[in-house]
Image (spheres, rainbow, N blue to C red):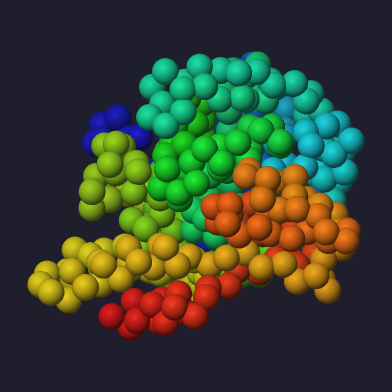
Amino acid sequence: MDDRTGEKLVSLVKCDDYGREKVYNAVKQSIDLIGGIERFISPGQRIFLKFNLLIGAAPEKGVTTHPEVVHAVARILKEYGCSVIMGDSPGSGLPYTEKVLKKHYAIAGYFPVSEELNIPLNYDTGYREVPAPSGKMVKRFSIISPLLDADAVVVVSKAKTHTLTFLSGAAKNLFGIIPGFEKPMYHGKMPSSDDFCNVIIDLNDLIRPKLQIMDAVTGMEGDGPHTGNPRRIGAILASADQNAIDVITARLMAFDPMQIGTIKGAVQRGYLMEDLSDVVVVGDDPEALIVRDFQHPSTYTGLSRAGSRPGIKGKIVSIMMSLLRQYAPWPKIDTKKCIGCMKCVRSCPKETILVHGKKPEIIYSNCIRCYCCHEMCDSHAISLKRNLPGKILALLVRRS
C-alpha cells in the first residue's frame, strides 16, 4: 500500500520470454517501481521464498512458477543480504515428505536455481498448528514449519486459471503452505467456492507476505491449475498486496475481477474499494497486454455483475446464474487414460472416489465438486462435464 495516498500499487513490466537477464531485469524493475526491495525486506532477515509447486511439471507446461523467475527473485534477495530458503508443499494428492519434495523440485527445474545461487530448497517436512484469531472462516491453520521460522515471506506466483476459484494467482498460491494431505480437509469443510476463497483470505491475513511477484510471462488457460494449456501473456508484476496484484492479473487474463472469489471477498471485507479504483498500475500499460481471447475454465460464466442489471431481465439472469451454480460441471474419469496412480483418491476430501478393478470410480452422491481430483490428475484422465440441463442453462446465461 502507498502510505501517502491509500493506493495499492501494482507494477507491470513487459517480459516476453524467460531469458535469464531479461527476467532478472524485469523483476528488478517491477520491484523498483513500487519502492525498491528495501521497502519490504531488511538485510540479514531470513526469507521464506514461496513459489507455486502444485505438482512437479516441466517449466514449459505452465503449471509451476518458472525457475527463471524464482532465480531472479532469489538473486535479488541474496544480493540485498538476506538469508533465503525456497520451497512449497505440493498439491493435495501428494504426501509432504522429503522424497516427494526432491522429486517434484527436480521435475519443476528448481535444483539448478538452488545450486547456482547456493540457496537451499526446503526439506523440513514439519508443520505446526497456528491460531488465526481474526479468521472469518478458519480459526486455526496447519502451516509448514520453515515458513513459520522465517522473518518474512515473499510469494512468487504463477498466473493460472483454476476450476474452483477461477484464478490461481497470488492469494491462492499461499494455500501451498498447508502440508499436502491436510489440504483436502479445508475443501471438505468449505465446499462452496466463495467459502473456500474466504479461507484463502483468512490464510493471507494470518501470514501477511511482505512482497508478491507474479510470473505472467506464460500463464495457463482452460481448466487449470494443472490440466490447462500454457498461454503467453508477457508480463512480470509486483505488489505488496496479494489482492491488488490479483486484480491486475485477472484483467490481463480477461477475467471480470469481481467474479474471482478472493477479490470479491477482499472487497466485502473492506480491503479493496468496491470499484477497485484504489488498485493503481505503474509501469507498462495493462491494456496493451490483455489477452482478450484468454480461455477461461469451463466452470466460469463471466457474468458476476449480471444480477445487478436493472429490470426484469436482470432478475431473470440472476435467477439463471443461481441455478447454474447447482448445475456446475461434474468430474468424469476416462478409464482408458487413467494410469491408476490414485492421486485422485488421496486428494478427495469426502473420500467419495472408490477403487474398483484397480481403477477409481467417483460416487457422485457425495461429490462436492471441489475438483481436487481433476487438479491432481497427471494423466489428464479427469475432465469436467456439465449435464444437458447445465449445458443449456450455461448457454442461455452466456447469451443473456
Q: Would you say residue 225 is visible in this rendering?
A: no
| Residue at 71% in and 53% down | 353
Q: Quadrant of the N terminus?
A: top left
Residue located 17% across and 76% down the image: 313
Q: Position of residue 331 (x, y in %)?
A: 62, 64
Residue shown at the point (56%, 37%) measured from the top left: 186
Between residue 379 and residue 120, name the one nearer to us: 379
Which residue is most to the left?
Answer: 311
Say above or below: 338 vs 42: below
Q: On screen, 383 above or below 372? A: below
Quarter containing the C terminus: bottom left
Image spot of residue 363 (x, y percent): 66, 58
Q: Position of residue 173 (x, y in %)?
A: 57, 43
Image position of 2 (left or right of 188): left
- Observer-nearest residue: 315 or 221? 315
Determine if residue 243 is in view.
yes
Location of residue 15 in the rendering, given as x and y in whole percent from the top left corner = 58, 60
398 vs 273, left or right, is: right
In the picture, measured across the screen, residue 269 lies left or right of residue 95, that is: left
How many labels sit on residues? Answer: 0
